[in-house]
Image (cartoon, grey):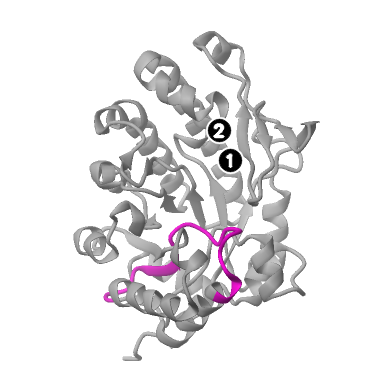
Amino acid sequence: MEMNSIERILCVLERGVPDRVPHFEWMVDVKVREALCPQAITPQEFYDRMDWDAVIADTSYNKVKVGDNRWRSEWGFVLQDTQEEHGVEVESPIKTLADFKRYSPPDPHAPGRFKNIEDAIEKYGGHRAVIVHLNDVFTLPRYLMGMQDLLKAIIQEPRLVRSLVEMSVDVNLALAREVAARGIKVVYTGDDYAYNRGPLMSPGHFKELFYPGLKRAIQGFKDLDLYVIKHSDGNLWPILDMIIDSGIDCLDPIDPLGGMDLAEVKAKYGHRVALKGNVDCAHLLSFGTPDQVRTATREALRKGMPGGGFILSSSNSIHSAVLPENYAALLETWKEHGIYPQV
């Protein structure tokens, strides 16, 4: 029986077998969007025209310009514009525990905070799953301290790290209550814990400083009847049991360049979580050929589809270096080969 997009996403997050494999990405760069669908005015309109099963929406924060291509967020960190859709933090407001004690995060309930989400629900919520981007325990501490200082603080100032993690969880649970009240069913947390060789911290430090907050965040989302897709690139094997044990519903993106083989992850954890991924966007989608992308997409479907519980996507996002014709090849292959046999 044919499902609609919302039914399809929820079926997969329950580790069921849908009518076809769902597809969506966290982000598609404007250059790729304009090449494939120039009539789409907004990212969400592109998602809709590409027949994705979900549209992605974010909470809204004000920013002020503080220099050439630099913007200060309500959070107090400064982002530098890049060639990508998202900037990179170049200044951060917290260096010490004393800084933290003086710091106040933005009001989760400020007027207009959820306008993007409300607009997405109104326009697409009747026929697409609207998935809201939140965070758990790493992204906000990274923004508020800067990556280098945060990684040093894991060793030198663990009390400060714990405080930042607790604040991040508190704020995101407040945001989650608001989005759940608006009818949202699925959130994803975009906090990256690893790079290709392994986690950014030792498994022991992850267990001590981040895992308690991760469990509290995920359980808080679940208490609100929200499904949770957990995103992190890189080699997660040393901390993967903890991530799964936190209670997430889906793991993304099963990074092939980080040694995360989709079939192996599915064999070990597919009875507990759904999986999303994992066509390589770092090299293949950026520098390969459409035929190579078709082969890799069929391989991802071959590994991910059996037994259901699988969402096809890239291994992160469709960033600015991705060739539009390669993403088109992924979409064509998905539509041709991502259909489950009717029983």
Task: Give the label on residue 175, or none.
Answer: 1
Task: Give the label on residue 106, or none.
Answer: none
Q: Is residue 16 left or right of residue 75?
A: left
Q: Is residue 58 left or right of residue 135?
A: right
Q: Nearer the viewer, residue 158 or 85?
A: 85
Q: Quadrant of the N terminus?
A: bottom left
Q: Tell whether label 2 touches label 1 (CB within 8 Å).
A: yes
Q: Residue furthest left?
A: 268
Residue matched to label 2: 171
| Residue at 45% from the left image edge and 34% from the top image edge | 138
- Which quarter of the picture shows residue 303? bottom left
| Residue 115 in view here | yes
* Coordinates of residue 32 in the picture (x, y in percent): 64, 67
At label 1, the amino acid type is Leu
Q: Which residues are magenta?
A: 306-325
| Residue 162 in view here | no
Within 10 Å of disc 2 (Cα), the crowding (few <14, some 14-19, many 20+) is some
Q: Nearer the viewer, residue 130 or 40?
A: 40
At label 2, the amino acid type is Val
| Residue at 44% from the left image edge and 43% from the top image edge | 192
